[in-house]
Amino acid sequence: MQFASDNTSGVPGPVLESLGRANEGYAMGYGGDALTTQVRDRLRDLFEAPQAEVRLVTTGTAANALALAVLTPPWGAIWCHDAAHIECDECGAPEFFVGGAKLITMPGDHGRIVADTLDNSLARAPRSVHNIQPAALSLSNLTEAGTLYDPDHLARLCTVARRHGLGVHLDGARFANALAASGASPAEASWKAGVDVLCLGGTKNGLMGAEAVMIFDPARAAEFDLRRKRAGHLLSKHRYLAAQFLPWLGDGLWLTLAQRANAAAERLAKGLAALPGVTLRHPVEGNMIFVDWPEDLARHLRTNGAVFYDAPGPGTPPTSGARLVASWDTDPRQIDAFLQLARDIPADAMAAGTG
Ligand SMILES: Cc1ncc(COP(=O)(O)O)c(C=O)c1O
Ligand SMILES: C[C@H](O)[C@H](N)C(=O)O
């Protein structure tokens, strides 16, 4: 019953088979191989962006930090949600890779920034020589709350950012889950809404460790290349990164895998919502669930083999809660066993706090 994260999942057969095929013979390094060119062309086609530049790296943190570095000068400020991964879980990588940027965090219900709040914040931002300079807006889709920005909401935020002279970065660690949930096209959910650089996550959706940075303004690619190299994120055996993407993007596998993860989360959320004392903290719009539940229930589930991260709720002291993440390979039987376990918690355990 593994619900810690979608990065705990395995790699689907077509991706492993593609790696095996890529292992034949020799290929130029550092992205000079034929597979890398095929991935670029495939992504340009899928995103209706023939001029876009595509760069592959191995982690989402590197993708985010490097993408933000080409949007933000060392004296720049990056606006983001206060629960953003770049704020909470990247150990200062964006600030480091930019060379001194400051993250300006904002509230927003269910992990989403509201356009008026962003507009007001940017309008009040001082811009004298004494101040860090507004430079970029960073959004995540899915958000870190597992919710969705639809293209209209995304476009409103990008319009505000543009009006204040900011570039827009989209952390798409779960972009496929967002597309699968919204039905939007890749272009509508990115550059057509106003996104300048998209970090398209593969690792959480079946790939072994591969992320594609899509730079919709090709003029920014040269700087990205130099930053990627000096960060140590230009792989010499680059064909093995590209080989992961080809089957994934080939016949829509990326969306099929994301739909499976989303459906698994929907199944789990439905069962959780029916349990006494359990509430869903955010709408479940992709493959992540946040619940508020009794500590005894969490303890009972963990004692019996369930794996998940705690996610304390608001308030002082914080309420007991958890994040549960479904993956492309989450087995419905795992979900049913987890829910049955939750239903079977001994009544006295809840009462005595020994569940
Ligand atoms: C929203 C989001 N962005 C970025 C990342 C970074 O990915 P990585 O752990 O590969 O650095 C994660 C990690 O899971 C994530 O959840
Ligand atoms: C939080 C952790 O860093 C990882 N991004 C995850 O979502 O599991």
Image (cartoon, rainbow, N blue to C red):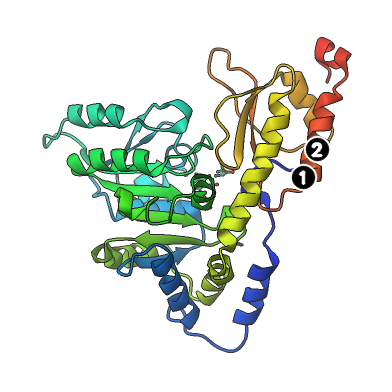
In front of the other: 167 or 163: 163
**Badge 1 vs badge 2, beta-carbon distance below 8 Å:** yes
Task: Look at the image and tell me whether residue 269 can be seen.
Answer: yes
Q: Is residue 11 left or right of residue 242?
A: right
Looking at this view, name the residue that lies furthest to the front: 183
Q: Residue at coordinates 67% horizontally, 74% vertically from top-left?
A: 17
Specify the amino acid type for callout 1: Pro
- Could you say whether the residue bearing mark 2 is in a helix, strand or loop? helix
The residue identified by callout 1 is: 332
Specify the amino acid type for callout 2: Asp
Looking at this view, name the residue that lies furthest to the top: 351
In front of the other: 299 or 10: 10
- Could you say whether the residue bearing mark 1 is in a helix, strand or loop? helix
**Does mark 2's beta carbon lie closer than 8 Å to ligand 2?**
no
Badge 1: few (under 14), some or many (20 or more) residues near its Cα, within 10 Å? some
Please, is residue 194 above or below residue 270 in the view?
below
The residue identified by callout 2 is: 336
Please, is residue 197 above or below residue 126 in the view?
below
Inter-mark Cα distance, 1 to 2: 6 Å
